[in-house]
Amino acid sequence: MTKTVVITGASKGIGASTSKVFAKAGYDVAISYFHSPEAVAQVVKACEDHGVKALAVQADCSKEEGIQKLADKVAKIFGKVDVLINNFGVAREPDFETISQAEIIEVLNNILISTFISTRIFVPKLMQETSSVLNLSSIYGLDQGGKISMPLYSASKAAIINFTQVMAQKYAPSIRFNAVAPGFTRTPHWEEVSPKYTKACLDTNLQKEFVQPEEIAEALLFLVKTPHVNAETLVIDAGRSKK
């Protein structure tokens, strides 16, 4: 029986690469996107080229109604979910000294609350015994890894690691929960960053290189395929956290 993976925020970057990697592994794929219908159409086609079904749902996953819309569409088309990957999140944050309460709530919605709500909505739909939930954290969420200029983002990504561990305990042994903490990954975000800043970031890596989105995608698939990895956070950062 073909398995189904749901990936939030998958029109570009890590989400898009993950969709293709899971499709190549034989999974039917359901993805959400907010903008970029042209980009997501290419992702869907790439998935379908592997002979699987692919569904793209336009939904704002920072809001509960958006996640519920995705879940309803998935239930109608696929009827089941084997893997949930909470990838939705926006890596930007206003200045700490001037950030408003509304902006704080927006950042939390985009990262932490969306992961919480998505998990709560999809857990009842996950197949038991073979199910996985995977959450995207960050090197900024690791112990002593927070970014000074992004304290709220860092705190949210740290909370995702803690949330992953708590959910693993709550739903064991039926559903496994793991997280991945990527380092500087070659996503479209870096097209908007100056070469000087990019070099400064990469110089903090032991390997002085970007992590590729496909590496994160393959790591997520590894966590799904390895049945006794649970409540863990896999760090993929070209050695940055060890420098």
Image (cartoon, rainbow, N blue to C red):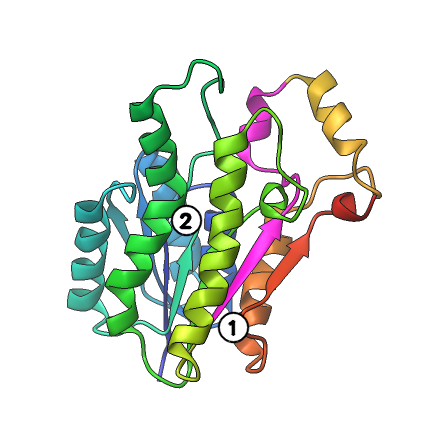
For the residues labelled 2 and 1, the Cα–Cα distance comes to: 21 Å
Q: How many marks?
A: 2
Task: Indicate left or right for 241 with 96 as reference.
Answer: right
Q: Which element is circle 2 on?
A: helix
Mark 2–mark 1 CB contact (< 8 Å): no
In the image, 24 versus 153, the foreground residue is 153
Q: Residue 57's spot in the image, x, y percent? A: 25, 49
Comparing marks 2 and 1, which lies closer to the viewer? Answer: 1
| One can see residue 229 in this view | yes
Q: Residue at x 39, y 74 (%)?
A: 170
| Residue at the farthest top position | 98
Residue 182 covered by magenta stretch: yes
Q: Residue at x 66, y 44 (%)?
A: 183
Q: Residue 3's spot in the image, x, y percent? A: 37, 76
What kind of residue is marked 1?
Val
Q: Residue 186's spot in the image, x, y percent? A: 62, 38
What kind of residue is marked 2?
Val
In the image, 139 versus 68, the foreground residue is 139
**Residue, disc 1:** 224
- Residue 233 vertical position relative to residue 39 in the rendered view, above or below: below
Q: Quadrant of the N terminus?
A: bottom left
| One can see residue 50 in this view | no
In the image, 205 versus 166, the foreground residue is 166
Boundaries of the magenta span: 177-193
Q: Which element is circle 1 on?
A: helix
Q: Residue 83's spot in the image, x, y percent? A: 40, 69
**Residue, disc 2:** 43
Task: Indicate left or right for 215 with 40 as reference.
Answer: right
Other-residue count near label 2 (Cα within 10 Å), few / some / many at <14 / 14–19 / ≥20:
many
